[in-house]
Image: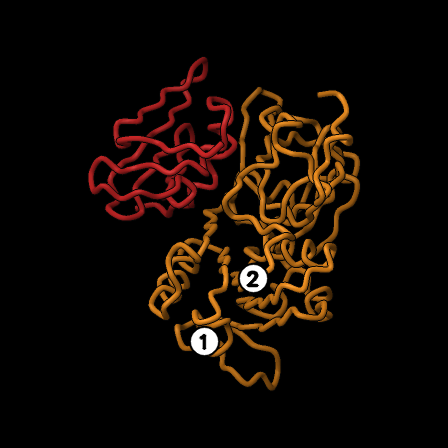
Chain colours: A orange, B red
Amino acid sequence: MSDVTSELQDNGVAPASAVDTTVWRVGTVVSAERESTSGRSLTIDVPGWGGNLAGQHTDLRLTAPDGYQAVRSYSIASAGAGQRIELAIDEVPNGEVSPYLVEDVMVGDQLELRGPLGGWFVWRPEDTGPVQLIGGGSGIVPLISMIRSRAAANSAAPFRLLYSLRAPEDAFYRGELERPAPGLDVTWLYTRRTPDDWPRPAARITAADLAAVTIPPSDNPMVFVCGPTGFVEAVADALVGLGHPAARVKTERFGGA
Amino acid sequence: MTSHVDGNILAGPLSDLFRFDVTLASARCVSCGKVAMLAQAMVYVQPKAYVVRCSNCDDMLMTIIDEGDATQLDLSGLVWMHVPH
């Protein structure tokens, strides 16, 4: 398929059949921005990339001079058509790949990418039902892509985000989330240290938090949960306990390296 | 036990072997009979292998081992896979 732009669907994303998502493509870092004390976002220009749906991920491959290769999966923060994608990476101490992406990689550097990947943890603009997003730490990344996709499509689907952070300075995309589009409701939750005069003391997320600030099961929302394994485990179990059908709770756990 | 991630992560590695998005295929566990999408399975990532376990009974569904010049795919934990077009 030589001209994928002629194959675009309504959402501006090339159908999976038009673009070979299995090949490794060489992307060039075109901008890098500090997001938090330990995280950074990278915008990468990837010739041949066929756009992506909100929530999809990419595999990123680094090759050392001796030929050793390391592959990691990263959620994509951007959504829609085009060959520029944004990733946001949180540094895992002693990790093999993330310290390089957060501390060392520079504008102009090249990275190998494959994708977009995964059709399960995705939100499509044609979905009009209510959506509850629950992110822990850098688990916000695929969720911000859904928020951006919703805004770009002028979707009226009701969205709520619950964003759990250890401390205020750990937030990714704070500026963007403090000015949400109409119909998007954002709740911040802190687990170790809160801003001054914050009503809720710092504590891990509980079923009572979920009952108080998320869309109730009676509204039959699609729920997307992304974060570290323990966080996702606790939240998903509590959601099912509150009455959400397990099939309406989609999860994306990340390990870390 | 090391911490696991979701089956979503298999989309890339298995795209080398299958023409469809394996994470959207539903599969039946040999051990407990649970039917779930592979995106919902638990995946333990090792340096040269993915160990995929049933989210219901924790038994092995499949293993994918990178042998360098070949991939060893063990599907003995699956009764069947249902692949959407």
User: How many numbered marks does the figure carry?
Assistant: 2
From the top left corner, tell me how far across and down residue A112 is, in percent.
Answer: 65, 29
Residue A145 vs residue A12, the one in the foreground: A12
Q: Quadrant of residue A67?
A: top right
Query: Is B47 situated left or right of A92 in this image?
Result: left
Q: Which residue is mark 2?
A: A129
- Chain at numbered mark 2: A
Type of amino acid under label 1: Asp
Type of amino acid under label 2: Gly
Residue A183 vs residue A167, the one in the foreground: A183
Residue drawn at the location 60% of the way across and 86% of the way down: A197
From the top left corner, tell me how far across and down residue B79 is, in percent.
Answer: 26, 31
Residue drawn at the location 70% of the way across and 27% of the way down: A26
Q: Which residue is mark 1?
A: A209
Compared with residue A94, is residue A108 higher up or lower down, i.e. above or below?
A: above
* Label 2 residue SS: loop
Residue drawn at the location 36% of the way across and 20% of the way down: B72
Residue A171 vs residue A155, the one in the foreground: A155
- Chain at numbered mark 1: A
Mark 2 on the same chain as mark 1: yes
How dense is the environment of label 2, judged by Cα within 10 Å: few (below 14), some, or many (20 and up)? few
**Closer to the eye: label 2 or 1:** 2
State how far apart marks 2 and 1 are (Cα): 22 Å
Image quarter where the N terminus of chain A lies is top right
Residue A206 vs residue B85, the one in the foreground: B85
